[in-house]
Amino acid sequence: MPDRVLRTAIAVVPFVGLVGTIVMTVIDALSPGGDLGRDLLENSVLWMIGVQGWMTGCGHMFFGEPIADSIGWPSKTPWQWEVGLASLATGVLGVIASGFDDEFTLATIIAFSVFYLGAAVGHVREMVTRRNFKPGNAGPIFFFDVLVPVYLIVLYTVVT
């Protein structure tokens, strides 16, 4: 039973940032003084980079075996700890970004984008060279790795 719960959690995590962003942006935008564009940017950075970064970071560091299996990569190797720390680092930036200026937010988006677009390249390489189409390699997380950085860069450009 715990294995099934963990595997379900792994499948759901890519959507936490999106749901959190939508819910909080609606609440913020409907509040007095709400600014839809600014609220969307701040919530996107908080939830899609921050909260999700903490979740994926902790997942890779502490629940490595099922995550490695979902990606189609070997478990019990140092890559999981390193990817976990990188995710956690971007997560920390995403959480604290709202306390700083727009330039800090931009730096956070750039760091996140380099990491996630680079991860997407790795996933494509796995799909092409090893025919690895496991859900953790070619499923929702792949699209997250590509679309969210582009979305955040465009959103930042429009809002600021």
Image: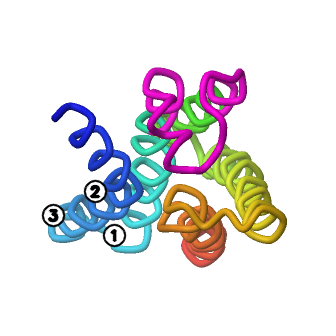
Task: Please name the amino acid that badge 3 sits on.
Answer: Ser
- In depth, the one of 31 and 6 nearer the eye is 6
Q: Is 118 left, or right, of 37 in this rendering?
A: right
Residue name at image x 71 percent, y 21 percent: 78
Residue name at image x 69 percent, y 26 percent: 82
Residue name at image x 72 percent, y 46 percent: 111
3D distance between C-alphas at marks 1 and 3: 9 Å
Q: What SS does tag 2 mark? A: helix
Check contact, mark 1 vs mark 2: CB within 8 A: no
Task: Please name the amino acid that badge 1 sits on.
Answer: Asp
Residue name at image x 69 percent, y 49 percent: 103
Q: On the image, numbered disc 1 is attached to which residue?
A: 35
Q: Is residue 15 magenta?
A: no
Instruction: Specify the color scheme.
Output: rainbow
Task: Please name the amino acid that badge 2 sits on.
Answer: Gly
Which class describes the residues within 10 Å of circle 3: few (<14), some (14-19), or many (20+)?
few
3D distance between C-alphas at marks 2 and 3: 17 Å
Which class describes the residues within 10 Å of circle 2: few (<14), some (14-19), or many (20+)?
some
Q: On the image, numbered disc 2 is attached to which residue?
A: 20
